[in-house]
Image (cartoon, rainbow, N blue to C red):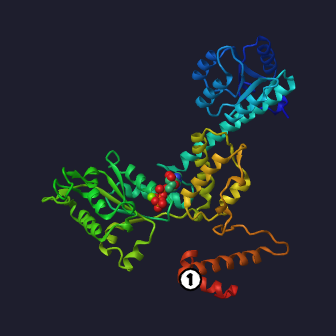
Amino acid sequence: MGNKTMQKVDQAGRAGRVLVLDDEPVIQDVLRNLLEKSGYEVTVLGDAAAARKLLSEDGDWDVFLLDFMLPDEDGMEVLKFARKLHPELVVVMITAFGTVENAVSAMKLGAFHYLTKPFKNEEVRHLVAQAARTSSLRRENRDLRKALEEKYKFEKIIGKSRRMQELYRFIDQVASSTSTVLIQGESGTGKELVAQAIHRRSLRAAKPFLVVNSHSIPAELLEDNLFGHARGAFTGAVGAKRGLLELADGGTILFDEISTISGDVQAKLLRVMQEKEFLPIGALESRKVDVRILAATNENLRDLVGEGRFREDLYYRLAVISIDLPPLRRRVEDIPLLAEHFLARYIKENRKEVEGFTPDVMAVFMEYGWPGNVRELENVVERGVVLATGDRIEVDSLPADLFGPGRTPMVPALVEGVGLSQAVADFESALIRAALEQAGGVQKKAAEILGLKPTTLNEKIKRLGITH
Ligand SMILES: Nc1ncnc2c1ncn2[C@@H]1O[C@H](COP(=O)(O)OP(=O)(O)OP(=O)(O)O)[C@@H](O)[C@H]1O
Ligand SMILES: [Mg+2]
């Protein structure tokens, strides 16, 4: 390891570009000679001011060798500056013998490693080669991440699964119309992101996009917020107030958690949709508005209509076009991509040095059922970044929930003497039992959960000898 043949050589035949910042002429010479012999392009500077200037103009270094003791500034400050400007830069600190504490705090600030003076040539060669490899890995990772995100990104939505790709096409189709869209999906599946994407891809993109969260506001206040009021409409209404409908004129309003709005507001909303006008509270004349209405819900609205808790006529108006967002467990192929995406975000936000997840962590992610969907994954990754002490997120920094009963093992343990068909049958039985349990024993409902026709499920139950 660390010999010349292991190094990645660029097209000009260089092993990489190294920046050295040290004020001692002897050290400067030793490092320059040593590294140039190994094929690196070496630039040597003697003070922090020069380094700050150069780094502001040029961040394309593979390795930055940085002394702690500089004539004009503390090397630690230069480290902070360099990492902030170029988060991918690989920095190796040069430290005098006996000041390893400094080196440790530098590593916490994102330095890759440290060299203790006086150093051996072999040690320098080895460490710089390692740093250069890390640098090219970081760049490759970054480029790959970018390429993936561009390919699998639609507005702010990430996903490569077939269902998400279909969703992107569907959004593009419906965005340009003025029609209402009902967005259904479990909590955390990205309903708000979808609503935003519809707005941004529509001709209304330059106009406001407002979100009304009916769940968090009491009914009377919601009405006031939505429709506004005339002056003197009620005690305390000293001036007139414009409602959200008016503020969103020409744009889009998302009614989040639409299932929670009161019967009163349901009736008024229906009128807005039918007549394109509304009456502010206490006003004598109605106002015309042109807003596109989107609605989101994590409850089954049709069921609520059946129970008499939601107006049927409003439901049909809202559901002219409906989008069902699949839960995360039904598109596990999106999990690695989403995990990487959130990792990149939270590394940046927390200024931490984390390269990725251990394979064990990824395996847990793939097997877990994610009841909180993408939001839950996002929270788990953020927590992992905050708790990470090494260069990868480890199983230790995952919350206990991920190992609890919500877990749906996708790959059962291999048991000696059990062939594939037996294992598949066992797995199938387990899933069917779980679905039946969830459906309260109602086969038709269990079939729906499993995405099977009731007749198919019935056959399987008989064939596998499942009693329930
Ligand atoms: N496909 C996705 N790509 C990237 N981020 C996503 C995706 N889906 C959800 N998120 C993120 O997950 C979080 C939850 O998304 P969002 O608020 O849109 O979910 P929701 O379906 O409206 O949830 P709720 O029903 O709880 O309101 C947000 O931080 C969002 O940015
Ligand atoms: Mg939401």
Q: Which residue is mark 1?
A: 440
Q: Is residue 4 above or below residue 439?
A: above
Tell me the quarter of the picture where residue 229 sits: bottom left
Q: Is residue 8 visible?
A: no
* Residue 302, percent from left and from top: 40, 75
Tell me the quarter of the picture where residue 283 sits: bottom left
What is the residue that sits farthest to the top in this orientation? 25
Q: Is residue 336 left or right of residue 124?
A: left
For the image shown, how many numbered marks are present on the structure? 1
- Packing grade of label 1 (10 A; few <14, some 14-19, many >=20) is few
| Residue at the image point whose x is 38% and y is 80% from the top | 306
Q: Is residue 342 left or right of residue 270?
A: right
* Residue 241, percent from left and from top: 22, 51
| Residue at the image point whose x is 60% and y is 20% from the top | 52
| Residue at the image point whose x is 79% and y is 26% from the top | 115
The answer to whether the beta carbon of the residue marked 1 is less than 8 Å from any atom of ligand 1 is no
Q: Is residue 134 above or below residue 394?
A: above
- Taking depth in this image into account, of 49 and 458 the one nearest to the observer is 49
- Taking depth in this image into account, of 156 and 187 the one nearest to the observer is 187
* Residue 346, percent from left and from top: 59, 44
- Taking depth in this image into account, of 271 and 222 the one nearest to the observer is 222
Q: Is residue 2 above or below residue 204?
A: above
The C terminus lies in which quarter of the figure?
bottom right
The N terminus lies in which quarter of the figure?
top right
Q: Is residue 45 left or right of residue 193?
A: right
| Residue at the image point whose x is 29% and y is 51% from the top | 248
Q: Amino acid at mark 1?
A: Gly
- Taking depth in this image into account, of 51 and 454 the one nearest to the observer is 51
Q: Is residue 173 visible?
A: yes
What is the residue that sits farthest to the left in this orientation? 284
Q: Secondary structure at mark 1?
A: loop
